[in-house]
Image (spheres, helix red, strand yellow):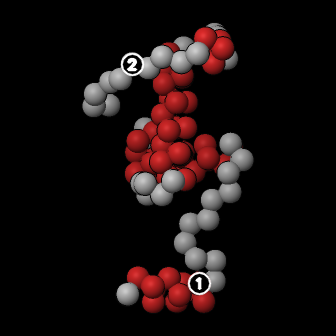
Amino acid sequence: MPGKVTIKIPKELAETFEGENVKSVQKYISEILALDLYMREEVSFGRAAELAGLSYDEFWDSVRERGFKLRVGPKTVEEAKKEYEQAKG
């Protein structure tokens, strides 16, 4: 992972990770930050998975385990046509 950043968090938050190793805490924080970027539409789902250090499927499972319901792509043919027309400009 290129570059590293040290962050400080409130002691109360740090205590929630008591007994966890540093790698699992880093993994958790990376997943949450990547998910946040995706939810704010700043990165694609695939890029968010990369940033989290997970495969697409692993990230998908992680997001679903947290209770998020993601919709990828249009639900209907009509939605697909509308998105296509909007993309054409």
Q: Can you say which quadrant of the picture contains the N terminus? A: top left
**Pointer 2: residues within 10 angstroms few (<14), some, or many (20+)?**
few
The vertical placement of 59 against 77, above or below, is above
**Pointer 1: residues within 10 angstroms few (<14), some, or many (20+)?**
few
User: Which residue lies under the disc numbered 2?
Assistant: 6
Mark 2–mark 1 Cα distance, whole angstroms, equals 44 Å
Residue under the point 46% across and 39% down: 52
Q: The residue under label 2 is which amino acid type?
A: Thr
Residue under the point 61% across and 43% down: 62
Q: Nearer the viewer, residue 42 or 61?
A: 42
Secondary structure under badge 2?
loop
Q: The residue under label 1 is which amino acid type?
A: Glu
Q: Earlier in the sequence, mark 2 or mark 1?
A: 2
The vertical placement of 28 against 10, above or below, is below
User: Which residue lies under the disc numbered 1?
Assistant: 79
Please state if 21 lies on the left or on the right of 87 as rendered: right
Q: Position of residue 33 (x, y in %)?
A: 50, 38
